[in-house]
Amino acid sequence: MTDKSPDAFRTISEVADELDLPQHVLRFWETRFSQIKPLKRGGGRRYYRPADVDLLRGIRHLLYEEGYTIKGVQKILRQNGVQFAIAIGAGDMSALEEMTRRTAEAKAREQGAPSAEPVASEPPPVRAEPRPADDPDQDMVVGHARPRARGIFSLGKGGEAAQAGSGEGALSHDNRTLLQEALFDLLECKRLLDQAR
């Protein structure tokens, strides 16, 4: 295969090779991230612009390197825009550092700690807690290991305790969010399996 110009459009197989992802993952991401819009030609062939590839690279980085869930990345894209993920995909980590700083400041404000400078209050993105690489409970998600959220069903403990007055055994907000995401993903898997039959 000959080297293409950096501005050339890429096929799905070229993008999958470049990002070290299976093609079905790219097609799946199109169903999860409305911002991914490759050009489609005859027979449904996908052609990715350079910005599309950077967007995919940014999404891949957020999912696999930073440990965000799909819902977490969707929220990041809604709050920060597509250019944010494209910048990450192009290697501009200052955008990610800025978002991390704002998230830490918002969390500090929620806990009553003074903040260095005012920042628009936004809840932090939904994240999965990484587990050690040798953890046997790690999930395999579309061909890649993805850390599973720790303590998703732990009730009444530490930072994930039920809020005062909400009753014994109530799920924390973070646990409810993770559970909703897991259920959504299971329903989508069922739909895809039903479609394949």
Image (cartoon, grey):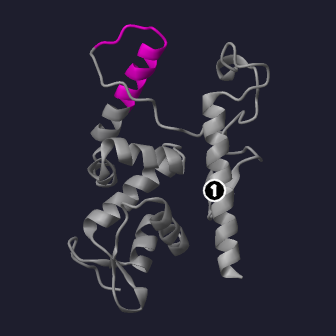
| Residue 149, position as x, y percentages in the image | 66, 40
Residue 163, can we see it?
Answer: yes
Residue at horizontal 33 percent and vertical 87 percent from the top: 41
Q: Is residue 153 above or below residue 15?
A: above
Please tell me how crowded label 1 is: few (under 14), some (14-19), or many (20+) other residues with Cα within 10 Å.
Answer: few
Q: Quarter holding the N terminus? A: bottom left
Residue at horizontal 74 percent and vertical 26 percent from the top: 170
- Which residue, given by chain and number where applicable, does mark 1 sit on? 185
| Image-quadrant location for residue 17 | bottom left
Q: Is 118 left, or right, of 186 in this rendering?
A: left
- Magenta part of the chain: 100-116
| Residue 183, position as x, y percentages in the image | 68, 51
What secondary structure predominates along the stretch shown in magenta? helix
Decide which of 75, 158 is in the foreground and name it: 75
Q: Quarter holding the C terminus? A: bottom right
Q: Is residue 115 magenta?
A: yes
Residue type of the residue flagged with mark 1: Asp
